[in-house]
Image (tube, grey):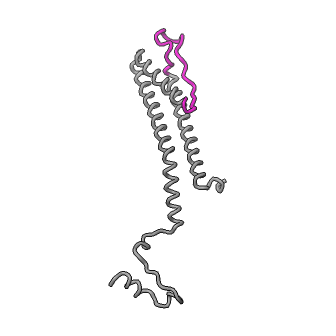
Amino acid sequence: MTEQSKIEAATPADTTGAGRTPVPWSQDFATSEHPDTARHRIQREYIMAVTELPRGNLERKYAYLQQLISRAKEELGHARSANNEHRMAAMQQNIDELVAYVSGYGIRANLPNRNGENGSTAIASFYVLEEIPTFLGELGFLIDRWYEEELAGIHDELLKLTGLAGRLR
């Protein structure tokens, strides 16, 4: 027995109405979706693809900034344990690179003081070791705040794309 004959056998004869012929249910119809459902699915996929671009980029920037802070903390540990000019210069260079990089994102932190006259002439231009952990903590906080603000911006874009921006306020 073919599929068409099974459908005809299961369909009562009086459901066709006056002058109407029954429409066969093909296999194509069984897997189709409602046009509104398809529209919502495609719109959601589009929105997710569009927001993934800036979010993925933001995630990479944030991870890199966290890596720079971790590297600065590691250099601080080496500078404390070695207590020589080479390690202090490496730590200073790491902090200067970190400050230069985050300033490109509008993140400004108060730099630690330099040793100046408090230490020997060899370390006078280096940062005071005791102030660096506070600086790194403040900078980490500022980076986290920057990240949250950027995520909020992406969220606002998502609301505009979905048309929900006006309804939620």
Instruction: Locate residue 151: give its quadrant.
Output: top right
- Please name whichever residue, 86 or 28, is drawn nearer the observer in this view of the structure: 28
Residue found at the far front of this picture? 19
Residue extent of the magenta highlight: 103-129
Name above or below for residue 19 compared with residue 118: below
Q: Is residue 103 above or below residue 58?
A: above
Which residue sits furthest top? 121
Where residue 74 sits, quadrant-wise, is top left
Which residue is more in the foreground, 68 or 132?
68
Q: How far across and down, in percent of the image, does residue 27 sit?
A: 39, 74
- Residue at (54% x, 22% y) in the render: 112
In the figure, is residue 164 to the left or right of 78?
right
Up the image or down, 94 lies above or below 19; here it is: above
Which residue does the image show at 47% across and 13% down from the upper left? 123
Quarter of the image with the N terminus is: bottom left
In the rendering, at what x and y percent does residue 100 appear?
52, 26
Q: Residue at x 45, y 69 (%)?
A: 32
Q: Who's the residue at 52% across and 88% down the image?
A: 19
Q: Is residue 121 magenta?
A: yes
Within the image, what quadrant is residue 138 found in? top right
> Where is residue 135 shown, x and y percent of the image?
53, 27
Residue 42 image offset from top left, x and y in percent: 50, 59
* 165 magenta-colored: no
Task: Look at the magenta stretch and give its main secondary structure.
Answer: loop
Number of numbered discs visible in the structure rendering = 0
